[in-house]
Image: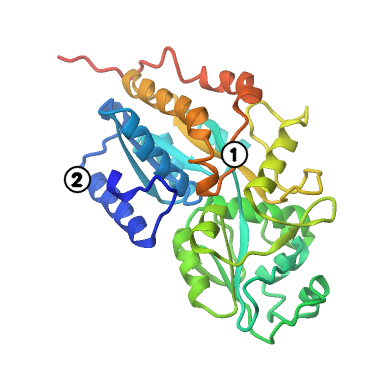
């Protein structure tokens, strides 16, 4: 898998397909068995396509620094990552969504560990519009686009937010994820908190009942669809925006400012949330929208690794070592910032993280097997 990863944070569609193909081939061949029988030096990470760019960089760096450890990474969607970490088919599940009350009841054996800050961004392809032009969006207008109630780019509601931009009478092609997606969870969270129409008709979900549009599996497919379809609109994380130099919009935040997603603005959102004394120690609360600050991006979120508390002792030790590396050395800008993520402030978070990580070791030898 090392040949499919670059230290500079780059990733191509071909490499994504190769990684996914290799992961699925090995899984079908039985190379990756349920967690109870995984080799101690073999770690499989699967789930969030938003986290995939960072995980690829981390995997290669960690394997270089820890000979004998093999890490396989696949972009399969947050829903896959959560469910398969819980049922033992993979070692670590990657998710953009936190463990909601429903998830915690369904997957009581999972611990969610925040590992970075990222966001969901609006991308678009409008014929004749200068790629340097940044369109403003608020939740109500975005919701009406994704509800199919705003159908053309020069609709008066879009023009009202962008009075100095000449927009064409081009039909809007709505693009969304078809799989269970944490990126969708974050994106619809913004719509849910800013639009009463969206709240009443669709709601926040990893796999909502989309009223209109075309669905695609994975962020890579969403990027390809938007880039190849004039008039289209979609949403992906910052890492994908940086890799493909995508045109992105600015979203209206709680203080009425239109802010573009960037490492600095998603870091501002995360740090503002952590300064809130009411923010829960287990991180199981959204930071979308309800954060004050002029430079705060309103659709930022924590990224999570989901870890099964019933991993055998050997595998758990390897996972914990990787996790501690990711939360310390792995937060260096050469990994996080270059991949489109804001690093976590580990020292201020350490007391909270200790409570979470202490659930993973010691004492997790439930599935240890006798050598005989």
- Between discs 1 and 2, the one toward the N terminus: 2
Q: Residue 154: x, y in percent?
A: 73, 82
Q: Quadrant of the N terminus?
A: top left
Left or right: 320 in relation to 355: left
Quarter of the C terminus within the rendering: top left
Nearer the observer, 365 or 332? 332
Task: Identify which residue, 37 or 281, lies in the foreground.
Answer: 281
The mark found on residue 156 in the picture is none
Kindly identify the residue that appears in the image at 77 percent across and 48 percent down: 295
Q: Position of residue 156 (x, y in %)?
A: 80, 79
**151 or 243, nearer to the observer:** 243
Find the distance from the CA under tag 1 to the CA under tag 2.
Answer: 33 Å
Q: In the structure shown, which secondary structural element does the residue marked by tag 2 occupy? A: helix
Residue at the top extreme?
Answer: 363
Q: Label 1: which residue? A: 102
Task: Name the residue: 81% across, 70% down.
Answer: 161
Instruction: Please determine whether, in this image, residue 132 is positioned above or below residue 276.
Output: below
In this rendering, would 255 be left or right of 74?
Answer: right
Colour scheme employed for the rendering of this structure? rainbow
Instruction: Identify residue for label 2.
Output: 29
Q: Nearer the viewer, residue 199 or 271?
A: 271
- Name of the residue lying farthest toward the bottom: 169
Q: Position of residue 335 (x, y in %)?
A: 48, 41
């Amino acid at each position: 898998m090392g040949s499919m990863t670059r230290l500079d944070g780059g990733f191509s569609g071909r490499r994504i397909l190769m990684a996914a193909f290799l992961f699925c081939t090995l899984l079908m061949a039985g190379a990756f068995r349920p967690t109870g029988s995984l080799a101690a030096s073999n770690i499989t990470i699967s789930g969030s396509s938003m986290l995939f760019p960072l995980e690829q960089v981390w995997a290669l760096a960690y394997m270089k620094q820890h000979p004998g450890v093999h890490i396989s990474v696949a972009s399969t969607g947050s829903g896959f990552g959560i469910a398969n970490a819980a049922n033992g088919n993979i070692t670590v599940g990657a998710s953009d969504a936190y463990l909601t009350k429903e998830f915690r009841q369904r997957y009581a054996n999972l611990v969610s560990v925040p590992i970075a800050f990222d966001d969901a961004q609006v991308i678009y392809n409008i014929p004749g519009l200068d790629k340097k032009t940044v369109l403003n969006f608020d939740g109500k207008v975005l919701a009406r686009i994704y509800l199919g109630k705003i159908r053309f780019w020069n609709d008066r509601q879009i023009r009202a937010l962008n009075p100095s931009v000449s927009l064409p009478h081009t039909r809007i092609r709505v693009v969304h994820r078809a799989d269970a997606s944490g990126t969708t969870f974050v994106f619809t969270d913004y719509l849910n908190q800013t639009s009463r129409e969206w709240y009443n008709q669709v709601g926040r979900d990893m796999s909502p009942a989309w009223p209109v549009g075309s669905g695609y599996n994975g962020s890579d497919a969403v990027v390809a669809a938007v880039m190849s379809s004039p008039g289209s609109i979609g949403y992906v994380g910052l890492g994908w925006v940086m890799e493909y130099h995508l045109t992105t919009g600015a979203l209206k935040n709680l203080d009425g400012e239109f802010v573009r997603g960037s490492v600095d603005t998603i870091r501002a959102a995360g740090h503002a949330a952590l300064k809130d004394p009411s923010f829960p120690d287990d991180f199981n609360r959204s930071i979308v929208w309800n954060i004050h600050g002029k430079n705060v991006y309103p659709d930022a979120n924590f990224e999570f690794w989901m870890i099964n508390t019933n991993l055998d002792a050997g595998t758990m030790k390897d996972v914990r070592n990787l996790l501690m590396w990711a939360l310390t050395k792995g937060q260096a800008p050469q990994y996080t910032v270059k991949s489109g993520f804001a690093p976590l402030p580990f020292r201020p978070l350490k007391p909270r993280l200790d409570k979470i990580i202490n659930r993973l070791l010691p004492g997790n030898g439930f599935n240890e097997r006798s050598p005989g």
